[in-house]
Image (spheres, helix red, strand yellow):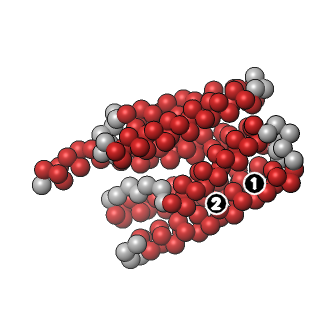
């Protein structure tokens, strides 16, 4: 009983180190955009993006290791991820027009995730975190951005290959989320 009470208290916490790190990542987004688009310094933008990625890893590790997973964190962490990814893709779109494909897929995926996620929370009362395929998409998006930032004169073939790989994995991920959320909404065990 005591364990369940502690677990419930943790889920309802607002101010935790992982949540503060997620908030910090949100604050880095305008700095990334300013560095890339205004200062025209892709390397600085890449360094800030790396800092953002490291804080993302740290908040996940701290939340799991020290039992600081919270409902707010389950929402704030992916929001920080998605907004950082969107900002990064929009910045890169200014130089690489094919990034538009990823922006469009991401917008559709996230719209679906918000609507279906709210329905799942309403039905189950639980906030679900990202699955393995969502984490792979995040890794591929950050990797693709890093390559485009570091390799300033990336060849169109390599650029298109990386964008295509991300697009395929994003479509697979949304398909798996659709299957999972449909089963949950039908009351099937997932």
In the rendered image, residue 152, in percent from the top left (x then y), is placed at: 82, 37
Tell me if residue 80 comes above or below residue 177 in the rendering.
above
Q: Position of residue 68 (x, y in %)?
A: 32, 42
Residue displayed at 60% across by 40% down: 84
**In which quarter of the view is residue 171 placed?**
bottom right
Where does the C terminus fall, quadrant-wise? bottom left
- When the figure is inspected, residue 118 is found, relative to residue 82, above or below; the finding is below
Q: Residue furthest top?
A: 39
Tell us which disc is closer to us: 1 or 2: 1
Point 30% across, 45% down: residue = 67
Lower position in the chain sequence, tag 1 or tag 2: 1
- Mark 2 Cα shell of 10 Å, populated few (<14), some (14-19), many (≥20): many
The location of residue 73, given as percent across then percent down, is 40, 44
Above/below status of 190 relative to 85: below
The circle on residue 170 is 2
Q: Which residue is mark 1?
A: 162
């Amino acid at each position: 009983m005591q364990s369940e009470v502690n677990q419930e208290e943790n889920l309802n916490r607002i101010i935790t180190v992982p949540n503060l790190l997620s908030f910090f990542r949100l604050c880095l987004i305008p700095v990334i955009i300013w560095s890339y688009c205004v200062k025209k310094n892709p390397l600085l933008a890449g360094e800030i993006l790396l800092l953002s990625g490291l804080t993302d890893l740290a908040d996940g590790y701290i939340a799991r290791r020290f039992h600081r997973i919270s409902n707010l964190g389950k929402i704030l962490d992916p929001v920080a991820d998605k907004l950082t990814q969107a900002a990064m893709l929009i910045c890169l779109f200014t130089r690489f027009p094919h990034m538009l494909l990823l922006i469009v897929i991401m917008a559709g995926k996230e719209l679906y995730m918000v609507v279906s996620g709210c329905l799942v929370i309403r039905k189950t009362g639980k906030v679900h975190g990202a699955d393995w395929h969502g984490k792979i998409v995040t890794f591929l998006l950050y990797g693709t951005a890093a390559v485009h930032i570091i390799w300033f004169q990336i060849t169109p073939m390599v650029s298109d290959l990386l964008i295509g790989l991300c697009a395929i994995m994003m479509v697979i991920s949304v398909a798996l989320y659709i299957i999972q959320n449909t089963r949950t909404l039908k009351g099937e065990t997932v």
